[in-house]
Amino acid sequence: MKKIFALFFVMFMLVSSVFAQSNLDLQLEVRFANLERIARTLEVSMDALISYVSQINGDASKLNDFKSQFLSAKSDFNSAKTHAQLDAKMQAASVIIGSFWQEYTKQFDANKGNGFAALKALADALKSAKPELDSLTEKYWDTRIANVLQIYDNDVAAAEKLLPLLKNHPNYTKIVEKLDEIKAERPNLESALKSKNEVSIINIQTKLGFLAQDLGNLVAGKG
């Protein structure tokens, strides 16, 4: 039995490493698409606030500098190769956004800005950019749906590749049944993703997580 588990572990590491890199790339693509729409919204908002500061005779030079720094940071997002790298780049961008907001508040207060006028300028800018922002949101969901399903398919394919190695496993029948349970959930996962309802998505992904945990326990000889 120990030899079977040892062989399974070696093969699992060989197979999973290939799919793990593929899944990482797919996960990052989803985050890139999400950041693209968020960053564009922020850029439109920055332009509106810079314009408003100029209208009230404020000094928008630093605001323009911070916007340029933000755009530079934004352009570097897609160079991230890991989640940790992307998190670090996002953190750096958030610092710039914070600096922009502090400078905007300073100029707003110093030049006796009108809150309603500023909000209207912002709302008008976002309304004008709505078709573009909606398109970016649609792109994000298309990417998310396709990539999450591909990650699911990769994980199922990895598990199926290992089944022949487990023919003599005492839990083999249960392992096959549990994998079939997981495979049967694909339509539910796809439906939840296409609904764009985060609660439904979380629910099905949580269910799949528990099923995967059960599968892992069976392979480990439990159950």
Image (cartoon, grey):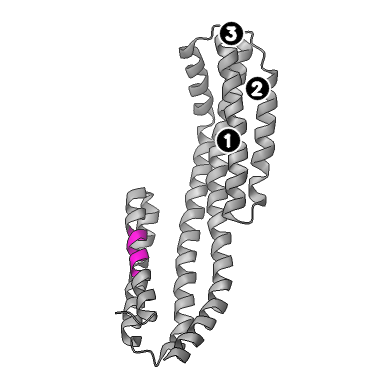
Closest to the observer, 138 or 19: 19
Q: Earlier in the sequence, mark 1 or mark 2?
A: 2
The quarter of the picture where the N terminus appears is bottom left
Q: CA distance from mark 1 to mark 3?
A: 24 Å
Residue at 49%, 27% in the rendered image: 127
In the picture, residue 76 is in which quadrant? top right
Identified by mark 1, the residue type is Ser
Q: Are marks 3 and 2 in contact (CB under 8 Å)?
A: no
In the picture, residue 218 is in which quadrant? bottom left
Name the disc covering residue 63, or none.
2
Q: Are marks 1 and 3 in contact (CB under 8 Å)?
A: no
The quarter of the picture where the C terminus appears is bottom left
Task: Please tell me whether residue 65 is drawn above or below residue 218 in the rendered image.
Answer: above
Kindly report the secondary structure that dominates the magenta region of the rendered protein.
Answer: helix
Dot 3, crowdedness within 10 Å: few (<14), some or many (≥20)? few
Q: Quick one: SS at disc 2?
A: helix
Q: CA distance from mark 1 to mark 2?
A: 15 Å
Q: How far across and down, in percent of the image, does residue 141 sit? A: 47, 50
| Residue beneath disc 1 | 94
| Residue beneath disc 3 | 110
Identified by mark 3, the residue type is Ala
Residue at 54%, 31% in the rendered image: 129
Identified by mark 2, the residue type is Leu
Magenta segment range?
204-211
